[in-house]
Amino acid sequence: MVLIVESNSALALLWQRHLERLGHVVRIADDEDHALGLLREVEFDIIILDLVLENGSALSISDFANYRQPEARVIFVTNSSFFSDGSIFRHCANACAFMTTATAPDDLAAMVEHYSAMRA
């Protein structure tokens, strides 16, 4: 199961469609509160998490996921240069990848496939 946490609903739906074509079950949250609620209720293998959310903190979501679901891996995405030095991997123990939001959906889906296979 994949959780996408993204404020841009069109982008989240684009990613969701690509992942569902590969057979993944996908849930979408558009802010911190919704994401935390889903993390309390559903077990996820992969979390695609935008670092720059309109409402809430991506780092709080990552931290909560690490506590609640320590096996879940987080693929961080962003459209900014924040954390472009790779320091996200020092701040978030569950981070497995860091990509731009402009990454092709097929490439993002390939990353999800890779890290999902590692969990199986």
Image: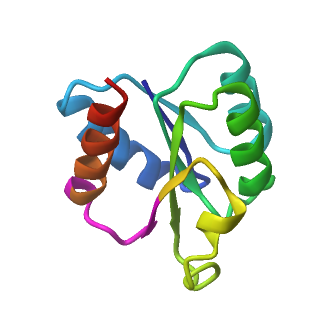
Whether residue 31 is visible? no
Whether residue 67 is visible? yes
Identify the residue shown where x is 26% and y is 44%: 114
Quarter occupied by the C terminus = top left
Q: Does 99 appear in magenta?
A: yes
Q: Identify the image quadrant of residue 43.
A: top right
Magenta-highlighted residues? 97-106
Residue 27 in the figure: left or right of residue 89 = left
Can you give x and y, in whole percent of width and height, for residue 85 in the image?
A: 57, 85
Quarter occupied by the N terminus = top left
- Whether 53 is drawn above or below 22: the answer is below
Which residue is the extreme one toward the top? 41
Can you give x and y, in whole percent of width and height, for residue 102 in the image?
A: 37, 72
Q: Does 107 appear in magenta?
A: no
Residue 76 in the figure: left or right of residue 103 = right
The answer to which of 2 and 55 lies nearer the viewer is: 2
Total labels drawn: 0
Q: Identify the image quadrant of residue 16.
A: top left
The answer to which of 115 and 19 lies nearer the viewer is: 115
Identify the residue shown where x is 26% and y is 33%: 117
Can you give x and y, in whole percent of width and height, for residue 58 in the image?
A: 71, 55
Colour setup of the view: rainbow
- Whether 96 is drawn above or below 117: the answer is below
Can you give x and y, in whole percent of width and height, for residue 86 in the image?
A: 55, 77
Identify the residue shown where x is 63% and y is 31%: 70
Residue 97 in the figure: left or right of residue 69 = left
